[in-house]
Image: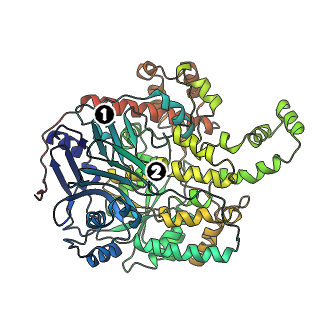
Amino acid sequence: MWHRERPVQPADLNGMLKAMVHRGPDDEGRFAERNVGLGMRRLAVIDVFHGQQPYYSEDGKIVAVYNGELYNYQSLQTLVESLGHRLNSRADGEVLVHLYEEYGVDFLDKISGMFALAIWDRRTHQMVLARDRIGQKPLYLYELADTVAFASELKSLMYLPDFRFEIDPKMLSSYLAHRFVPAPHTMLKNVSKLRPGEVLVIHGDGRRQRWRYWQPTIRQPESMDQMAYWADRLHGLLVDVVRTHLASDVPLGIFLSGGLDSSIVAAIAAGTLKNPLEAWSATFPAKYPGYDEFGWAQKVASHYAIPLHRVEVDLSITPDRVRELAYILDEPMADPTVLPLDGVARAAAEQETVMLSGEGADEIFAGYAGYGEVQSLARLRQIPAFLRAQWIKRQWPGSNAFKRAMEPMAERYRGVGYTFSPEEQAQLLRPEWRVADRPGAVAEYWASHLALPDLQAMQGFDVQWFLPDDVLLKTDRIGMHYNLEIRVPFCDHEVVELALSMPLALRRFGRQDKRVLREVAKRVLPSEIVNRPKQGFPTPLTDLLAGPLHDIAWDTLASPTARSHEWFEGARVRQLLTDMGPGHGTTSRQIYALLMLELWSEEMGSRALSRRHVPYVSSSSDVPS
């Protein structure tokens, strides 16, 4: 935290650190002087017995704390030592203070990995906060006129004495549209989050500068469509990236579904590691037909002699657990794949500390089915306008597709997580909360990318919002809850840049998805895995809401507490509840979004009110003078 004038109170750091013990059970460090306080909890992965934080420069004038992994830390260690600096450990983060000494804020251009960091310059009284390029690690800000508090989880901020848990109903439309609140906004007033690749500098006089030091290049893609050329580049890069993600001094495993993405990571890792890599696969039992991919995972594991653990996750999906997940996730977020992820992560954490994941490939290589609609809608637009209008007027089969074809992508698309249309929001929300569902940065994105091909524009949005605010959010929160570091090689910024520069036809052509990635897969995987149908990370949400989660949905959304918010039209909520069940997949997604929002507001709100500054025993680090 930073105060413009008043001193930092030790009790404030105590509470904030207490709220994040699960992110780092191995060690604690803190620094405080006058108006500045830094604290951290450590999950030891590299140089387990050394590398305690905060990190200090040789003269003690630069102080840093950070969360994450720097995958190019070995070359950075060589660099800072060549510049005359002395390192006290092999820990990856120690280079941060020395890079800042040499390059100032521009040091961010030299580091590669997943991170959220804070650097305090005692010479200039300047605080630097930054987040990694793709947004694998979170950083929340609570800003008042003379105070900035920051943390890796929103719940940590609730321990501040002046924190107010105040929901911003103007964000409801955005949440309903996307199933998350796009950064830099959150559902709370006075709380924002740094966007991926963003830095905030707080000067000694209180001035604040905030900008993106990196963002993905979303432009017209390359036109050279030679498959072998792009496959060669991608294959070589993935081999290098996966190898850097294997650095660990603690047990390391992989989430393996048997799908293309995790199987490629497993194949490259298995060919690199000296010790066998263990794999973990989430499955649902036979009473949920069509949701068990374990047979495919077995084929991959057997091919590479990888020990495989089967985890049937349905028993862990209970009403009490869903309520707890609403708190663990930190923000209202309605991605149902968090349910099986929670079960398999819990099981893996009993043996592993670091896990590899294939997340991110669908967004950057155009794997989602919705991306395939671009070409079919383009063909519909070639039909004369008067025929399309008549088709829609008569509501013949396919009229919804004609409607989508006639609506510009910049007005229609709200990401992979699209849940409530503007029309559905108007039916659900009370009149006073019906606002534009695209907050500032999102609206600016679409306004400035009108000329892009539809597929490129869709992927650009998903990479900058759906990926960090949904996919990577759940990955971070669930992993850290179980003291598990989850690494995502496909979210390396160089891989993202390469994927988004590929010709569109090499990403997707009709139903042929991730075409270049599949070409790479042919080099490392058995053909039956390469050619298997896509299933994704399955969650039988409709069946769950008709079964074990039926009562909590009704009891929560029809409760006096939910009605007291006065956000939604009660009759519409009851209609959705009545409709949920088999054959109503869309309604199930909508009910789940409302459920997670209400559970989040109840759990976070009640805990914010009941927080106490309990005495907290810590291992405080010495502060160099």
The quadrant the C terminus occupies is bottom left
Q: Quick one: quadrant of the N terminus?
A: top left
Q: To which residue does mark 1 refer?
A: 145
Q: For residue 181, say whether it is visible.
A: yes
Residue 496 position in % (x across, y down): 53, 62
In front here: 302 or 149? 149
Q: Position of residue 378 (x, y in %)?
A: 78, 50
Task: Indicate whether 200 appears above or below 142.
Answer: below
| Residue topped by disc 2 | 340
Residue 363 image-quadrant placement: bottom right
- Residue 386's spot in the image, x, y percent? 89, 36
Would you say 102 lies left or right of 442 here?
A: left
Q: Which numbered mark, 1 or 2, is in the foreground of this view?
A: 1
Q: Residue at x 22, y 50 (%)?
A: 39
Instruction: Find the distance from the CA under tag 1 to the CA under tag 2.
Output: 42 Å
* Label 2: which secondary element: helix
